[in-house]
Amino acid sequence: MMEKRRKRICRFCENKINYVDYMDERLLRRFITERGKIIPRRITGTCAHHQRMVTTAVKRARHLAILPFVAETYK
Amino acid sequence: MSVYDTTIILNPQIEEGGINGEIKKSLDLIDRYGGKVINEDRMGIRRLAYEIQKIHQGYYYRVTFEGTGKVIDELERQLRLDEPCLRFLTCLHHEEKVSHKKAEADDRPADKPVEQSAPAETATDADSGEEEAKE
């Protein structure tokens, strides 16, 4: 059974950010795993509205080869 | 008429004059079909996250322009046929975008593991929580 965690505020709502730029590699890297997969919002604490923006931005960045589709992992 | 952003990745191995020529071709096309160029952002050469047509680096260029759908159609048609153009992406412009310096982007290689990973942090918290509960 999951313990009750402290409420995590969406970092975009907190800073009143309305747009997630697909060219912002530094920001978007925080929302993908080492493998390059998008992290679910129950872990990052993002709200649904901004999570959709993040997802669109990540997918656009992948198309423009700013982020990988699949990242190589070291074994 | 709406404002659009088109980001283009060009093959950096063509000579410098070639890249400027390609950019000028796109700008002329926008003007020719009734669009108005608002802003340009030459982001320079950066490492690609994966290879495209066996190339590992690309010259990134973004143009913000106002135009109709026809302008976009013609621009994309030309980019699709153009050999030095590796990728392009057109989307609606949003005011809060900032122009990006290439220095930040070039520093980190694409295959380096991400420094912070949220799942690892969460796992650590969960593990420590369980250990405390057992004790």
Image (tube, coloured by chain):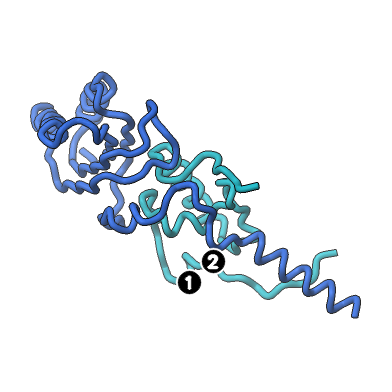
Chain colours: A cyan, B blue
Placement of B109 over or under B78, stated as above or below: below
Are the residues tagged 1 and 2 within 8 Å (C-beta)?
A: yes
Judging by the rendered image, the residue that carries numbered circle 2 is A10
**Alpha-carbon distance for marks 1 and 2?**
6 Å
Dot 1 amino acid type:
Glu
Q: Is residue B80 visible?
A: yes
What x and y, as percent, mark residue B31?
A: 9, 32
Image disc number at residue A14: 1
Label 1 crowding class (10 Å Cα cut-off): few <14, some 14-19, many 20+?
A: few
What x and y, as percent, mark residue A45?
A: 60, 64
Q: Are marks 1 and 2 on the same chain?
A: yes
Given residues B108 and A40, the one toward you in this image is B108
Residue farthest right in this picture: B134
Residue A34 located left or right of residue A17 = right
Residue B72 located left or right of residue B108 = left
Q: Residue at x 14, y 46 (%)?
A: B38
Q: Secondary structure at mark 1?
A: helix
Q: Residue at x 31, y 33 (%)?
A: B88
